[in-house]
Amino acid sequence: MELIDTHCHLTFEELTGDIEAVLERSKAAGVTSWITVGTDTKQNQKAVELANKFENMYAAVGIHPHYAKDVSSDVITTLKKSAQNEKVVAIGETGLDFHYNFSKHHDQIRVFARQLKIAREFNLPVIVHSREAFDETMDILEQFGPGVKGVVFHCFGGSAEQAKIILDKGFYISFTGAITFKNAQGARGAAKIVPVERLMVETDCPYMSPEPMRKQKINEPALMIHTAKLLAELKGMDFGDFAEAVTATSKAFFSIP
């Protein structure tokens, strides 16, 4: 069995200091490949360096909406350079976050649209962060998304109705350990309607350890097995068959050999 953690932040200091042990525990649990995701220029550089160091590790490079206010033309130039590395498989994470509003809405929208253009330029899929901005995110994708190789909504916690809108657009949906939380009935309902051909699994570590590991404050790829098992149960699938299917989906979406 092999699973891919399609969205982790292995460059964050909670994990990077013990990275080799983290990866060994991950492989022992059956999570054998990883996409480490950048959030700003510094993290993008670290993600590319880490991906180039380890077999079966890939990188995504992008500017998180929290940091949109700091994006200059130099930041965009550096991002485009990073996107050309052979281990980079996506642009992201990018999108809109109207919960924290660390950047003004107009800056978030500007930077999100710019990254969609970069994704088209380099024929890469996009990893979308959308928090309390579903309608606005869909509007930006409608305007600037046509021609993008693929779109995945990461860490999805929305409703089945929102999931259907995403699926109708041909986009993908990825779930984290948050789907195992007691208050995640809506997201579990959404997972039931997402076909495995459009579904991926992630940790978003070091955040959101799944049940029954909530007390482990630093999440890591090995724990993704609990999320995957719950998703297989929700889909009414044998776990091995589910793992094989979502791994095939992930490899195809990110063009991983």
Image: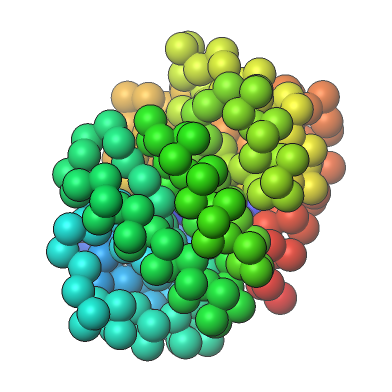
Front one among 21 and 141: 141
- Residue extending farthest front: 143
Front one among 118 and 41: 118
Q: Please report the residue visible at 67 percent of the width from the left and 49 percent of the height from the top.
A: 171
Q: Please report the residue visible at 48 percent of the width from the left and 66 percent of the height from the top.
A: 116
**Could you tell whether 76 is left or right of 33 in the image?**
left
Q: Quadrant of the C terminus?
A: bottom right
Residue 6 in view here: no
How far across and down, in percent of the image, does residue 13 sit?
21, 57
Look at the picture and state if 157 lies above or below 16: above
Front one among 116 and 126: 116
How far across and down, in percent of the image, does residue 43 sit?
27, 67
Q: Please report the residue visible at 74 percent of the width from the left and 65 percent of the height from the top.
A: 252
**Could you tell whether 172 is left or right of 57 in the image?**
right
Look at the picture and state if 121 lies above or below 68: below
How far across and down, in percent of the image, does residue 254 sit?
63, 67
Residue 7 in view here: yes
Look at the picture and state if 118 lies above or below 32: below
How far across and down, in percent of the image, does residue 250 sit?
68, 57
**Could you tell whether 112 is left or right of 245 in the image?**
left
**Could you tell whether 131 is left or right of 242 in the image?**
left
- Model colouring: rainbow
